[in-house]
Image (cartoon, grey):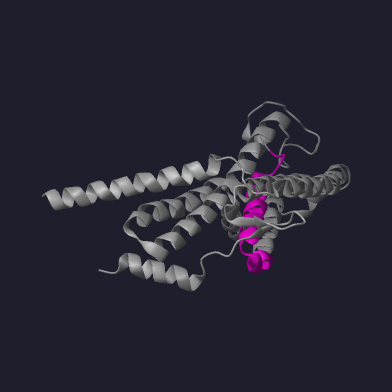
Amino acid sequence: MSAPAGAASNYFSGLLAVLRQSAVQLVRSPSHSRRAEAARRSARHVVQLTAILGAAIIALMYLLDATEIGWMPKRGTPSLWPIRILTDFGKSAYVLWALAGLLFVVAFTAPVLRGQARSLLLGLGTRLQFVFLAVWVPAMIGEVLKWVVGRGRPFVGDNVFNFRHFGGSEAFASFPSGHANTAFALAFAVSALWPQARPVMLAYAIAIALSRLVLLAHHPSDVVAGALIGVIGAMAVRYWFAARRLGFAIRGDGAIVPLPGPSLGHLKRVAGGASAP
């Protein structure tokens, strides 16, 4: 009985070490020598995005939000069931639980691996941490803004300037769109790590945003605001990771670029090693 007990003890010690390492690396002091350049470059991009999309949000509120309601099918139309399925792929709870599940798999598998396989899996875990936080941080900001702004959804009367600040009602939680926030944050995060995925992720984010309009869950200005918050929040998380040399490098001009990560072939070998007798 001592051998199994010892093996279990070693496993749980290894699991605690993995969890401790993953937490410590996120809160350690930033160490990258070019983090100041990256901060200035990121701040410049945030100001530009906010100016452009902020102006678009105001214009949409006055010029399109009310008109767009009449273009969409009646709320609850039975034939919209595919759109209702599609839109759930942008729900923050579903996306975050899926990412959390992948993180749990990494955490519980890593203690049984050694050498390169363990390093590859932990490298994947760091990238999954980034994606999770890049979605979670803007999602939390968006929820606070929904509560503060309290804008009525398109099905709550015909007045697009219908506000009930700090109301906390789902009917008055239109601005910003949480689904657009999550979809664009996820698209930015995945594209930041794997640039080749950018076209697919952008198409995904746009499809989720459009689904919110078709279902009369949000005004056009709401989805643009959600996209803005999602991208800016994900950019902030990317900078946090890059400043600590986690998953990203910073070039001399301050541009943040992904570090080489585990390839699909590497991950298949890791999975095979983990399941081998």
**What percent of the width, then of the height, locates residue 213?**
72, 51
Give the number of callouts.
Answer: 0
Q: Residue at x 42, y 42 (%)?
A: 20
Q: Residue at x 88, y 42 (%)?
A: 62
Q: Nearer the viewer, residue 157 or 38?
A: 38
Q: Nearer the viewer, residue 175 or 99?
A: 99
Q: Is residue 2 magenta?
A: no
**What percent of the width, then of the height, locates residue 194?**
61, 64
Find residue 187 and report its image quarter.
bottom right
**What percent of the width, then of the height, locates residue 141?**
65, 37
**What percent of the width, then of the height, locates residue 228?**
74, 47
Question: Given the current orientation, which residue lies at the most extreme top position?
Answer: 166
Q: Is residue 195 above or below residue 134?
A: below
The span shown in magenta is 174-200
In the image, 108: left or right of 252? Answer: left
| Residue 35 visible in the shown view | yes
In the image, 167: left or right of 12? Answer: right
| Residue 218 visible in the shown view | no
Question: Given the current orientation, which residue lies at the most extreme bottom position?
Answer: 265
Q: Is residue 180 magenta?
A: yes
